[in-house]
Image (cartoon, grey):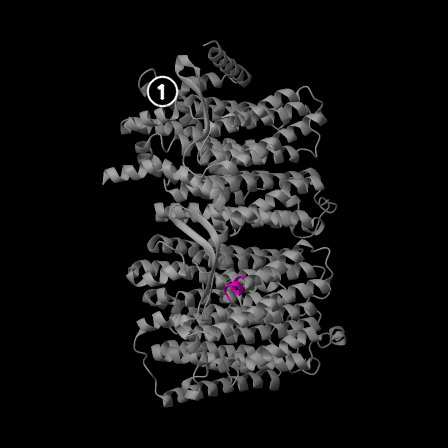
Amino acid sequence: MFITIFLLFFPLLVALLLFAFKPAQAKMLALVASIIELAVSLYLVVIFPRTDAVQFVVDVPWVRAFGLHFAVGMDGISLLLVLLTTLLVPFIILSSFSRTIEKASTFYGLILVMQMALIGVFCALDGLLFYLFWEIALIPIYFICLIWGGEDRGRITFKFFVYTLAGSLFMLVALVYLYFQTPGTHTFAMQALYEAGRALPLYEQSLIFWAMFVAFAIKMPVFPFHTWQPDTYTVAPTQGTMLLSGIMLKMGIYGVIRWLLPLVPAGVAAWGFTAVVLSVIGIIYASCIAIVQKDFKRLIAYSSVAHVGLISAGAFTLSTIGVQGAMIQMLSHGIVVFALFYIIDIISQRTKTRTLSELGGIRNVAPVLTTVFVVVMLGSVALPFTSGFVGEFLLINSVFQYHGVLGVIAGLTIILGAVYMLRTFQQSMSGETNAVTARFADLTTQEKLVLYPMVLLILVIGIYPAPLLEISEPAVASLLKIYSNLSASVK
Amino acid sequence: MEMLVSLVPLFPLLGFLIVALNVRRLSHGVTAFIACGAVLVSFVLSVVLFTHLLGMPADQRALGVTLFDWIKAGNFTTSISFLVDPLSSLFLLIITGVGFLIHVYSIGYMHDDAGFNRFFSYLNLFVFFMLLLVMGANYLLMFVGWEGVGLCSYLLIGFWFKNQAYNNAANKAFIMNRIGDLGMLLGVILIFVHFGSIQYAEVFPKAEGIGTGTLTLITMLLFVGAMGKSAQLPLYTWLPDAMAGPTPVSALIHAATMVTAGIYMIARNNLLYALSPATLEVVMVVGLATAIFAATIAVKQNDIKKVLAYSTVSQLGLMFLALGLGSFTSGIFHMATHAFFKALLFLGAGSVIHALGGEQDIRQMGGLKKYLPATYFTFLVGVLAISGIPPFAGFFSKDEILVAAFAHNRIVWALALAASLLTVFYMFRMFFLTFFGKERASHDVMHHIHESPKSITLPLIVLALLSLAGGFMGVPEVLGGSHWLASYLAPVFASSAALAGEHHHMSHTLEYALMAAVVGLTLMVILYAYMRYVKGNRVPAADTQVDGVQKVLANKYYVDEIYHAIVVKPLYWISATFDAIVERLGVDKIVNLIGGSVVPASRGARLLQSGSIGYYIFVMVVSIVLILAMGIIR
């Protein structure tokens, strides 16, 4: 259907057009384009039938020589992530309006190319196409970090690039191996790869599992594959951090749900427990490190590792509750972490520091920012009636059912999360003002335009998440059917 | 009638939204009107619901309403749905009734505060969450209220946010509650796993088919939540610190309502607890231990609010003792009377603090009765009520708990009696030191002393009347009553009462004797306190001059210091170690090593490590273009 193609290539088209415009026009054009994307994806959400079928499919043969199809489409799982992408991009663009950005056309062009690649990742129904979009997504974010990043960006973005690229090479090897297992003239078509993967003996499934898992685990990132992340998040320009944490890390989780769980069920059954254990270790490990961070941005980077650990653990429980929890928490995390990084940007723009101990007392002078910060913080610590609670409850629920002890350890996230978030809030916002914060100006209209919708979404999703959960539920249920069949056959 | 049910929490929510969204626009008068009005409307609705329930046949007294599905995933479903039955309707009356009085009181108390509007918005939000807690028809909605009131408590303890010590107290309260909440959350999940639902109406009928071991685990986990929220050993240390909040907050949240959430939770789950005797035993022991432990600390506190705070911890312990004894009605009864007299005492203390311009140390008070007559008189009623002097409210409820304890075990009874006599002592110690004896406040303070305005004294008078008459809702048979409360709550506790079976009855003579003994001892303790602090004019020594056991008590058994040493410090040590050693030196290196050693990747990795990303991207782009081109050319 035309609409998927439009969603994919409209940003790319605009990105190319941007070079013809002056910076001021370029950013408006980028904003308008991203709002159009959002409108289209909202329209899709409205017309999307609540079934497990893949909708809006386009499937044209592309490179006959290796059976590559340009096959894209969306089921509920894809749609939610496309929605997250198209939702956040306009706000990411808007969030940059208050600062002057050099080479603005390139900057916004790269963001739009990034959007195209992300939507491609979430919509690809062909293994090689998925891989292509996966790698393409790396290029714009690499340049965004390299050109507009902070101190020591060269070394850090290099590490980031090598790390994630090395990971995805494993995935490529796995996909190519599966490709040769498909019958006839070979194909990368998703269903064919699924069937090829499921037919493999356990040993080979295990190898495929690890090859894919490492690629995804690095992207998310899951402990102990996370060491590129805090540096990169910290050094990247705010919009880069937002893209990375808000959307890009969801590629990894999406990869697990779409390209790992249904691909090698026996491999997952054998190694899923290890994945859950690693994820749960990551929750505690990263939360603890967040507690002692002094740099606001770095602290949130670690908190993101912790939250993603819980999402990943939930996904690997192979239960509908866990995967649905992962879906809704991906949305919530995207919104919350985007808002947090924007708040950090606002504070550090005005005070020229991100060191928590140098801040303080902002509450006295910026009540609106304070209120916004409180709601976002509550979303982050998963207070009931915020979006964070819906996801974390379902995820903790699934992990606890999967394994009692692991569930309790994973549950510690609600305590540790409160420890570091409340401390952060106290250090930056409470107390008396100091020389740095005494003349702190409250939110501008443009900043409110970005943050108010996030606050509203955090509350609305927290109170009434049913419409979102309904979108992905059928697809998740049918995706996990393989496991109920598997356990039935064991019995 | 069902429609009215959802209106009860709606009004405080609206009040919160209106005030919060216009916090810098509304005048204080309008804010006070909206905030108090919202709670008053809820109170009126609660009264209407209450009378409606009374008009229904006793065993059908329940109103349910479902608004919409909340969280649904896989086989898990939960809805926003409310239940008003005798138990929740009683809580509704107390929350909105006492809540309204404290709202009115706050108008006077917070009069000069720049954060007046913010204060009332938090207060309304608190009432909303507290109502959700007791009205929710399922465990998760109770949990929403449970965490929601915790949030409001956090916001109000740290209300004066310029003071970092207050902020620390707020963080401590939130985090400690979260420890309890995790237990509770896991309990709720376990209920879902074993019952297939978290709706009360679907859980309770299945309870007897579930194994005792499972039920014990569930009830223990839920009780961990209660330890946090209701400040029981070992999770109580946040409550005394919570006194950093404005005094009306201490009265409403940290005495009358929020901290009794644990009592409500166990009463609501009386059937599950009755089916797990081991947990009941734990509840009883924890309650009793807390009651004594906190009472001994209270004896050596000199901050008027700290005395009341430890007293609250101790009284909550007595309520848990009652619940642990399986005497659910007495637990709820004491919760109700305690809500009256403890709110009264806190508000009275607030009036004193207000009059003395912020002084909270009872060593700096004395002789205030002639300056603050209304406060003095109502405070006296509160002290008499908590001490259990007949016919004040506390007498009936405390007596009932002691009777239940006596029937269970003489040692438990003796310890409970000791806790309650300690209570009598420290309450009268505080009372005498505050209102009697020499005027120890500075000349400057005495010069400005004044009785509080009507908005403060009127709530005191109403609460004093309730503390005087509140006990009559549960006059025991032995005193010629029919215990209205017990029969009102009977349908809620019917299933667990059936389990308890034969109620061993004491002879009336024995009950009379016990009662007389307790009252006699109480009077003796009062006399002792009188001799010591009024006749003897004793004033507690300065903090530096105490030693031995006294010092241990004055320092609250050093529990905060112990927690700091065994929990906080290790956590920070581990975190710092992870950060400095494992993260920087360990994981990164190991991962790189593993990465390098895996064969399929090493070829690519070696290429990459030449360092030229630009080159690689170039290759990548060219390849993609080639693939594209091949597609077009075919």
In the displayed structure, B248 sits above or below B605; it is below
What x and y, as percent, mark residue A330? Answer: 49, 39
Task: Between residue B455 and residue B532, name the one nearer to us.
Answer: B455
Q: Work out which residue is located at the far bottom of the displayed protein and give it.
A: B509
Q: Is residue A437 left or right of residue A194?
A: right
Task: Between residue B189 and residue B241, name the one nearer to us.
Answer: B189
Main SS of the magenta part reads helix
Which residue is under mark 1?
A: A179
Helix, strand or loop at mark 1: helix
What x and y, as percent, mark residue B265? Answer: 44, 64
Q: Work out which residue is located at the far left of the displayed protein and give it.
A: A491
Q: Of the residues shown, which amino acid type is indicated by label 1?
A: Tyr
Residue at image location 61% in from the left, 23% down from the top: A15
Q: Quadrant of the C terminus of chain B?
A: top left
Residue at image location 35% in from the left, 53% down from the top: B196
Residue range of the region highlighted in magenta in the rendering: B1-6
What x and y, as percent, mark residue A154? Answer: 58, 24
What x and y, as percent, mark residue B4? Answer: 54, 65
Q: Is residue B280 left or right of residue A50?
A: left
In the displayed structure, B100 sits above or below B22; it is below
Q: Work out which residue is located at the far top of the displayed protein and give it.
A: B633
Task: Between residue B492 and residue B69, name the one nearer to us.
Answer: B69
Note whether residue A66 is visible. Answer: yes
In the displayed structure, B464 sits above or below A299; it is below
Q: Is residue B217 left or right of residue B452?
A: left
